[in-house]
Amino acid sequence: MTWQYWFVVLFLFSAGLSGQSNQEWLIEPGISFNHYQAQVKAEVGDPRGERLVNIFEIGINVIASYKWNDWIASGLFLRVDRGQRDMAIFNGFDEDGKTTIRDKVGGTYSEVWFGPIIQAYWKQFTLELGYGAIGLRKDNGRADIQNSAGENYGSFRIHPSIAWLVNTGGFIPLTEEIDVSIKIEYRGRYYLERGGKKLLNNIDHGTQSIVPVIGLRWHIL
């Protein structure tokens, strides 16, 4: 039996655990941010040249769920990311002492995930498991990965069995209706198609990420 089967079983089981205490709808929008740079200088304080690594990413995560009792909820999530990723090899300094690079690769990318999610609560802590039933990634920095037709453009489509999201964290009540949520998000996924065609030689393109997510959570009775 596949992971999808057991996730559906767990999802339906959570829906059957309804009790009489604290049943409510929850809407939770959040934002993630990742910025990383690497550079070389002859000495600290010298003029900055080209960066060896430059990554900037911002993401939006929205979860709509129904809390069946004090400790379990289930619903749907939407995850959208947009970023810029550039990398290169150090190639010495120019006449002004600034860093030069070679073999630069990279570009913009965007990703969209949508799927079911299960949330477990214990006091003010949460653990969440989500499955990316729909996942697409447009990556202008991966011209080296072609599909079976030799094309290096088009969106990557996610592998139906390896598209998982895990959040762990907690929340701080602001009012009776609103909480601040703070989480660490892990996503592991593989892509098997680009532009609607299998990747060249049936390879799989895998990625994983760990980012903080900060948001607000509304209680809708």
Image: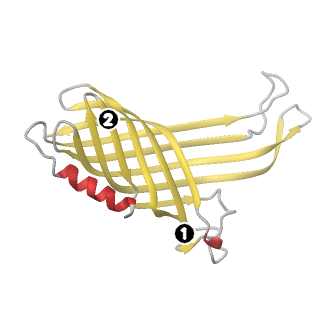
Quarter of the figure with residue 8: bottom left
Is 106 in front, or is 14? 14
Q: Earlier in the sequence, mark 1 or mark 2?
A: 2
Indicate the secondary structure of the residue bearing disc 2. strand
Does residue 191 appear to the left or right of 11 in the view shown?
right
Quarter of the figure with residue 19: top left
- Residue 5 image position (x, y, % from top left): 33, 62
Residue 47 position (above or below residue 89): above
Q: How crowded is mark 2: few (under 14 residues within 10 Å), some or many (20 or more)?
A: some
Name the residue tied to disc 2: 126
User: How many numbered dots are placed on residues in this image?
Assistant: 2
Indicate the secondary structure of the residue bearing disc 1. strand
Q: Residue furthest bottom?
A: 149
- Give the amino acid at mark 2: Thr
Residue at 67% over, 62% down? 143
Name the residue tied to disc 1: 193
Q: Which residue lies furthest to the left in this view?
A: 20
Q: Which mark, by number, is residue 69?
A: none
Residue 93 position (above or below residue 7): above
- Residue 146 image position (x, y, % from top left): 65, 69
